[in-house]
Amino acid sequence: MKPLNDLTLEQKVGQLLMCGFHGQHADEQITGLIRDYHVGGVIYFRRNVESIDQLTRLSAELQDMAAEAGALPLMISVDQEGGMVARIDQEGMTQVPGNMALGATGNPEYTLECARILGCELKSIGIDMNLAPVVDVNNNPLNPVIGVRSYGEHAESVAAHGVAAITGYQSQGIAATAKHFPGHGDTAVDSHLGMVTVPHDRNRLEQMELLPFRKAIEAGVDAIMTAHVMFPSIEPEPIPATLSYKVLTGLLREEMGFEGIIITDCLEMHAISKPYGVAEAAVRAVEAGADLILVSHTLQDQVAALEAIVEAVRTGRISEEVIHQAVERIMTWKKKRCGQQNDHLVSPKASETVEATDVEPVDCTKPTEPNELTLFKIASSSITIVHNDGLLPLDPEKGVYVIWPEVVQRTEVDEPWSHTESLGMALSQLRGRVREHKITTQPTYDETDRILADVSDSEQVIVCTYTSAGHLPKGQQFLVEKLSENHSLIVIALRNPYDLLEISRPGSYVCTYENTPAVVRVLSHVLTGGLQPTGSLPVRLR
């Protein structure tokens, strides 16, 4: 293993790239990136996962490949935020609650425990970095990309839960990544699809968007991910934060004192790739102060980014000292998180910044029952009865009709689960006479007509809504409105609590913030009166 000063320029630049690939084994794409382009980081998606055992073998295979190539250990990462954003949902990985569910509990200790559980499990399968927690303050009901990925709309609460998550992950040897800096919460456009602006003045940014990141830095967070969002009060030029020297170096490094790794969000997102192109954006991000460039999908873009950064150094556009400093930060991280066998990777100067963790690791060899108990407690503490006009608990003498939306279409922030449990399934274990009609999240008028005919003689009607973007889909809105003409409805928002803003006031309204099996099982007990939930809305329905 060569020391930092003996690495070639190409080897140094390779350390600045984190790349995804498309196989469940070391395919041609990732093999070439590691062996020929010296990439230092890998990101997993659902497409890479068949089982926990398979993923563990894949992690080992990739690390062996890097070692055989004489490269530094890989930084292997994943977006395992919890709740509705979980790349690994196979048996053996705890489905921890998402951020808004945890925010609804009002108890950061739950967040700490979930992060410790998840951190332990990720470490056991060869993952060293989680691209979490999201510490965006979601105070825009129409936000199509953050929503329940946020702990809520109050900056102090988001900061408290964010610090708890960071502490939990890093106690298990997992690098936490606070995202999306300087804040993606108050937006109404998805930066996967286009450019976004947060127009607020610096005073407002300090009180809201920046507060959780300041607290994350104080807590010693290993990494911060940038947002492809424009902040004119910080950067007057019309460029996103990811490419702004004033945001990444002036604000984050110099003013806020962050010394860890700055990682970009994926440069293939349209807010970046369409106006700049991935290769040019990679160069600009390094110029702005980013250490780690994320290119998640396309081999052509990954290679172009690598070659563009090398060329920028050779032509003098980027100083090699900038590359050297970024690689030194990455090597510092690899010593701290990749294990004792990598002690020789870090220069004495860099090693001075390494700090020991004070929290005892979770014992991953213990049975899963304590985890299940934790999930049960959190679910009962997060489910929120917003209002109840006497329809809850359900009358055991009357039949129940459940309308359940199934998630079948994958998006960047919404993926069908490999194993699910519907509310009708869960209720049928507790009450007889339960009928269930499953719909898509975009029901047609014909589906609505069939439901209206089928439900006509039902005495208790539960409509579950599901919104992954900023608006409740029109088909679900229409269905709820038509049903409410003849029935007193119990409406359950399975994801976005803001669904209530787009329908007439139902007889009862319940928020669960996610539709994971643990939540659905607890919800069935809440509806039948066996449990009294204690969740409070972490956002205002105004």
Image (cartoon, helix red, strand yellow):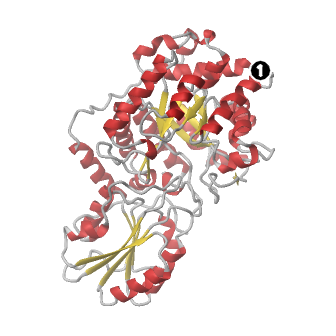
> Front-most of 235 and 337?
337
Residue 242 in view here: yes
Query: Residue 498, percent across and down?
Result: 51, 67
Q: Label 1, secondary structure: give it.
A: helix
Number of numbered tags placed on the structure image: 1
At x 27% / y 66%, what residue is drawn? 524
Q: Give the residue pinned by disc 1.
A: 314
Would you place residue 187 above or below residue 480 in this image?
above
At x 64% / y 55%, what residue is drawn? 193
- Rate crowding at label 1 as few (under 14), some (14 to 19) or many (20 or more) other CA atoms within 10 Å: few
Would you place residue 56 above or below residue 141 in this image?
above
Badge 1 amino acid: Arg
- Horizontal arrangement in the rendering, residue 321 relative to residue 166 (left or right): right
Quarter of the image where the C terminus is located: bottom right
Would you place residue 33 above or below residue 49 in this image?
above
Q: Quadrant of residue 319?
A: top right
Query: Residue 151, percent across and down?
Result: 48, 51
Residue 123 in view here: no
At x 72% / y 32%, what residue is drawn? 283
> Front-most of 384 and 401?
401
Would you place residue 334 above or below residue 165 in this image?
above
Query: Residue 225, percent across and down?
Result: 58, 38
Query: Residue 174, percent across and down?
Result: 43, 31
- Horizontal arrangement in the rendering, residue 506 relative to residue 533 (left or right): right
